[in-house]
Image (cartoon, rainbow, N blue to C red):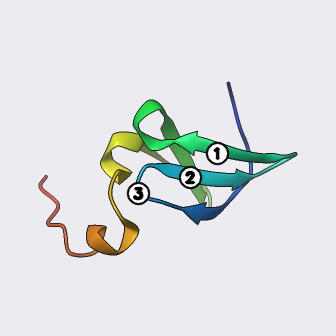
Amino acid sequence: MHIEGVVIDETKNTLKILGDKLYTVPKDQVEIAFEVGDKEIMVDGKELIGRPEMRLKKRWRK
């Protein structure tokens, strides 16, 4: 399934995306493509699991 829209809310395990309707998407089962300017960034939803405020404190490993 392909969903296009704007992320309007985020919880520990889900994203709420407003497109042609409101979708609640589990983070652990998706791969997300964000468009930033003319670039597309792919993110595995499993990397986003956790409370949004706690990810700010997480150290990212390369």
Q: Do the residues labelled 1 and 2 touch (CB within 8 Å)?
A: yes
Q: Are marks 3 and 1 in contact (CB under 8 Å)?
A: no
Helix, strand or loop under label 1: strand
- The kind of residue on which mark 1 rests is Thr
Residue positioned 64% across, 54% down in the render: 16
Residue positioned 37% across, 52% down in the render: 48
Tell me the mark number nearer the camera, choosing from 2 and 3: 3
Q: In this view, does 46 lie above or below 59?
A: above
- The kind of residue on which mark 2 rests is Leu
* Residue 53 falls in image quadrant: bottom left
At which x and y percent is residue 12? 41, 57
- Of the numbered discs 3 and 1, the one sitting upstream in the chain is 3
Per the image, the residue denoted by label 1 is 24
Horizontally, residue 6 falls left or right of residue 58, namely right
Figure quadrant of the N terminus: top right
> Cα distance, mark 2 to mark 3?
9 Å
At which x and y percent is residue 26? 51, 40
Residue positioned 73% across, 44% down in the render: 4
Q: Closer to the camera, 8 or 35?
A: 8
Q: In this view, does 15 lie above or below 52?
A: above
Q: Closer to the camera, 61 or 58?
A: 58
Horizontally, residue 38 falls left or right of residue 5, namely left
Helix, strand or loop under label 2: strand
> Cα distance, mark 3 to mark 1?
12 Å
Q: Estimate how packed mark 1 is, as few (under 14), some (14 to 19) or many (20 or more) residues with alpha carbons within 10 Å.
A: some
* Residue 60 falls in image quadrant: bottom left
Per the image, the residue denoted by label 2 is 15
Residue 12 marker: 3
At which x and y percent is residue 18? 76, 54
Residue positioned 71% across, 38% down in the render: 3
